[in-house]
Image: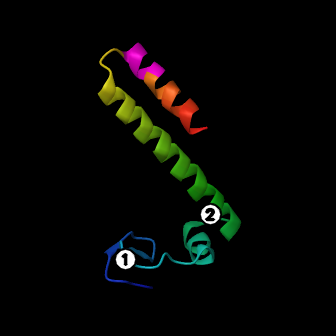
Amino acid sequence: MRSTGGRSTGRGWAVHPYSEPPPLADLAAESGFVSSVHVASAMKVVRKRMMMMLLREVAAETASDPADQQAEYQRVVEILR
């Protein structure tokens, strides 16, 4: 098991803000993915979903009405495209 002094994730690798990420092949084997390509794809999906979630939170902070929040979110998404 590799340890970089960070907190353990319970999957045989540690998360540390200043450490190199483990190779995708290691993550694939330890997490049950078929290949490192599948890990990379899953990570891309998670990053995109997190970004969209954060944008929704920011839009919610800028407007009090839910309809205005949705409109603000859509406006920001369109700007970023």
The relative height of residue 34 versus residue 2 in the rendered view (above or below) is above
| Apparent side of residue 22 relative to residue 4 in the rendered image (left or right) | right
| Apparent side of residue 19 relative to residue 42 in the rendered image (left or right) | left
Name which quarter of the figure residue 38 lies in: bottom right
Question: Where is residue 59 drawn, in percent x and y?
Answer: 38, 29
Magenta extent: 66-71
Image quarter where the N terminus lies is: bottom left
Question: Where is residue 73 drawn, in percent x and y?
Answer: 46, 28
- Element type where label 2 sits in the image: helix
Q: Nearer the viewer, mark 1 or mark 2?
A: 1
- Residue at the far front in the pictured view: 79
| Apparent side of residue 14 relative to residue 64 in the rendered image (left or right) | right
- Residue positioned 63% across, 76% down in the render: 25
Alpha-carbon distance for marks 1 and 2?
Answer: 21 Å
Name which quarter of the figure residue 43 lies in: bottom right
- Type of residue at label 1? Tyr
How many discs mark residues in the rendered view? 2
- Element type where label 1 sits in the image: loop
Which mark, by number, is residue 58? Answer: none
Question: Where is residue 35 drawn, in percent x and y?
Answer: 69, 69
Name which quarter of the figure residue 3 lies in: bottom left
Q: Decide: marks 1, 2 in contact (CB < 8 A)?
A: no
- Residue positioned 55% across, 73% down in the render: 30
Which mark, by number, is residue 18? Answer: 1
Q: Which residue in the protein does label 2 denote?
A: 39
Q: Residues within 10 Å of mark 2 (few under 14, many from 20)?
A: many
| Magenta stretch contains residue 67 | yes
